[in-house]
Amino acid sequence: MNDYVRSMRSRIGHDTLIMVGVGVFVVKGEKILLQKREDNGLWADHGGALEIGETLEETGKRELFEETGLTARTLEFIGTYTGKEMFFTYPNGDKAYIVGNYFICSDYSGEICADPAEVAELKWFGVGELPPDTVISPPSLAPLKKCAGIIRERNAKR
């Protein structure tokens, strides 16, 4: 939890906080690297909350490195997501309305190494073999489907 969120939580408790989030889908060929979240056991993108002064890209790169050990060289923006599926309650009871900004990263370096404090597992999934919707973190579901569609479309053109 970043300092801003911690400060706001000390004032509002578990009430809903509007948060700007950034998610990154790492792509290799026709596969997407997902993480099983340590806090709720659901599959998701790699990401987190924007810190004051950061750009969306800086947040994505920072979070990707923290959670996977991978360094993003470039990020491709795929969209901003809002709406009812972006209301999220964390296992500790904190409620958030996430303005989610999502990226694809296929240009990266480093060795995959999960951060055990946040990530229970890292696993590559083929675009046609994604986990069932019921085990995907709700804010990640629509952007993950868009990412998979982009990958399918690109590979069909090859």
Image: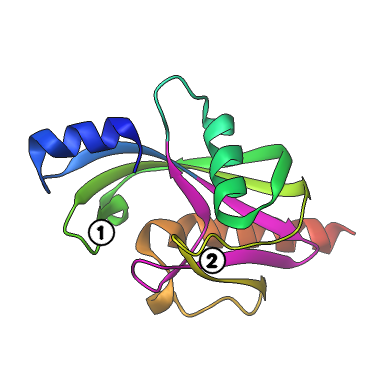
**The one of 125 and 122 positioned closer to us in this rendering:** 122
From the viewer's perspective, is residue 65 above or below residue 158? above
CA neighbours of label 1 inside 10 A, class few (<14), some (14 to 19), many (20+): few
Q: Is residue 14 left or right of residue 85?
A: left
From the top left corner, tell me how far across and down residue 52 is, in percent.
39, 23
Res 112 → quadrant = bottom right
Q: Which residue is mark 1?
A: 90
From the top left corner, tell me how far across and down residue 84 is, in percent.
26, 53
Q: Amino acid at mark 1?
A: Tyr
Residue located farthest toward the top when viewing the structure as drawn: 53
From the top left corner, tell me how far across and down residue 115 is, in percent.
54, 59
| Quadrant the N terminus occupies | top left
Q: So how many labels did they put on this image?
A: 2
**The one of 91 and 23 positioned closer to us in this rendering:** 91
Q: Amino acid at mark 2?
A: Gln
Q: Which residue is mark 2?
A: 35
CA distance for labels 2 and 1? 16 Å
| Quadrant the C terminus occupies | bottom right
The label on residue 63 is: none
Q: Residue at x 25, y 59 (%)?
A: 90
Q: Is residue 49 left or right of residue 25?
A: left
Res 146 → quadrant = bottom right
Q: Is residue 104 left or right of residue 49?
A: right
Q: Residue at x 62, y 47 (%)?
A: 65
